[in-house]
Amino acid sequence: MFKATLNNVTLFRDALTAVSELIIEGIFKANKDGLYMKAVDPTMVALVDFKFLATQFEKYEVDSEQEISVNLETFLSVLKRASSSDKVTFELDSDAKKLTITFAGKSTRKFVQPLISIDDAESPEMKLDFPCVMDVQTSVLEDGIGDASIISDTLALSADAKKFEISSKGDLNQVQLEIEKGSRALLDLSAKEACSSKFSLDYFKKIIKGAKLSDVVKIEMGKDYPVRLTFRQKDALEISYVLAPRVED
């Protein structure tokens, strides 16, 4: 049994919108702590780890861990029909393999979404050791991504004990954004060694959708190594993305 009610669906919907940039179908695990999903994008380049805590729901009931497998595009199309004043209730019928979504406001509306069959292959456990960790204002990361998009399809991140840098280089042009330690835009920086990796800019354009959820993004990286970006709202939600580096021929 799983049944949960949100007073306002906006935060949940915004979080899923960010996730859906990379994940088409997913299996939510509902337990006493909240809703969780870990999934790899279809190209196997990015891993998404989603957590939405039970404390965000007005009512939250689950008797044992439940799985809710949905097409995210369809799920979001339903959630977009809710107004900010609607109470939204999710109720799982495991036997009938369906999820009922009820909007209670000026009227009561019900949507029934069938659960889909997804291969529940375990997402790979990544034991990653990041020598460089920093907390950066998301608006600065947005600027770096926007600047890079006019130069190339590759984004480079680098960091050392004194600064964090976002850059991109094309055939003729190049751009660089640098934040020194102590800047208000760089809330924290720890670097055991110099770090630098290149990534697909298209993926960063999708990942930065998470900026709507948090003013700060935690970036963890290494040298020619995956990067992990985490958007968090304390006691509410957390979305982490692990992105593989771009390997040049």
Image (cartoon, rainbow, N blue to C red):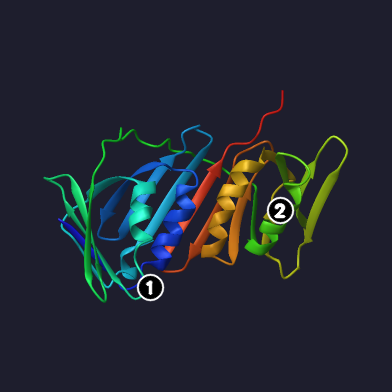
Q: Which residue is mark 2?
A: 146
- Element class at badge 2: helix
Q: Picture coordinates of residue 161 (x, y %)?
A: 75, 55
Which residue occupies the foreground of this view, 81 or 134?
81
Q: Picture coordinates of residue 207 (x, y %)?
A: 56, 50
- Give, as a three-letter code, the residue at label 2: Gly
Q: Which residue is mark 1?
A: 84
Q: Is residue 110 above or below residue 86?
A: above
* Residue ranking furthest to the top: 249
Q: Picture coordinates of residue 125 (x, y %)?
A: 43, 38
For image coordinates 52% across by 47% down, the residue present is 241
Q: Picture coordinates of residue 135 (x, y %)?
A: 63, 61
- Give, as a three-letter code, the residue at label 1: Ser
For image coordinates 39% across by 56% down, the residue present is 51
For image coordinates 23% across by 73% down, the residue present is 107
Is any atom of residue 196 visible in this view?
Answer: no
Screen quadrant of the C terminus: top right
